Amino acid sequence: MDWAYRNNIAIEYIQPGKPVQNAFIESFNSRFRDECLNEELFFDLQDAKKKIEKWRKYYNEERPHSSIGMKTPNAFEKELTNSEKL
């Protein structure tokens, strides 16, 4: 919580059993668990950091997302940034 406060990140809680109140995060958590945590063995903290970073790059730079027109998040962001400059 200290880290969030120092970085101006608001902590918001949802009601137990109400994942639709935070659907985007719940969806991400599910993907992270299914595609990374359940698929890897972590031998120590350094190994976990390395494997999670590899998955994060895949998730943002290579994996298409149906919610953003089968683009990667990085490509979608670049497209938005370019359209805002017009």
Image (tube, rainbow, N blue to C red):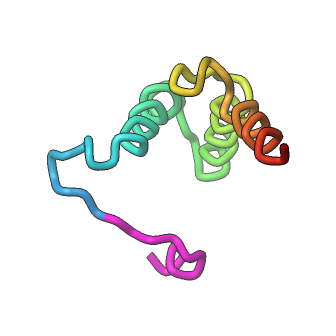
Q: Which percent across, then down, holds residue 80?
A: 72, 39
14 over 26 or under it: above or below: below
Q: Is residue 43 toward the left or the right of residue 24 in the image?
A: right
Which one is nearer the viewer's eye here, 11 or 29? 11
Q: Is residue 68 toward the left or the right of residue 77 in the image?
A: left
Q: How many numbered discs?
A: 0
Q: What quarter of the picture does the C terminus occupy? A: top right
Question: Residue drawn 65% across and 38% down?
Answer: 56
Which one is nearer the viewer's eye here, 6 or 78? 78
- Which picture quadrant has residue 53? top right
Question: Residue drawn 51% across and 26% down?
Answer: 67
Q: Is residue 45 toward the left or the right of residue 38 in the image?
A: right
Please give the range of residues in magenta: 1-12
- Which picture quadrant has residue 64? top right
Q: What quarter of the picture does the N terminus occupy? A: bottom left
Which one is nearer the viewer's eye here, 76 or 29? 76
Q: Which percent across, then down, holds residue 40?
A: 53, 29
- Residue 68 part of the magenta-drawn span: no
Question: Residue drawn 76% across and 34% down?
Answer: 79
Question: Residue drawn 55% across and 76% down?
Answer: 8
Q: Which percent across, then down, holds residue 28?
A: 46, 38
Q: Looking at this view, name the residue that lies furthest to the front.
A: 86
- Residue 4 part of the magenta-drawn span: yes
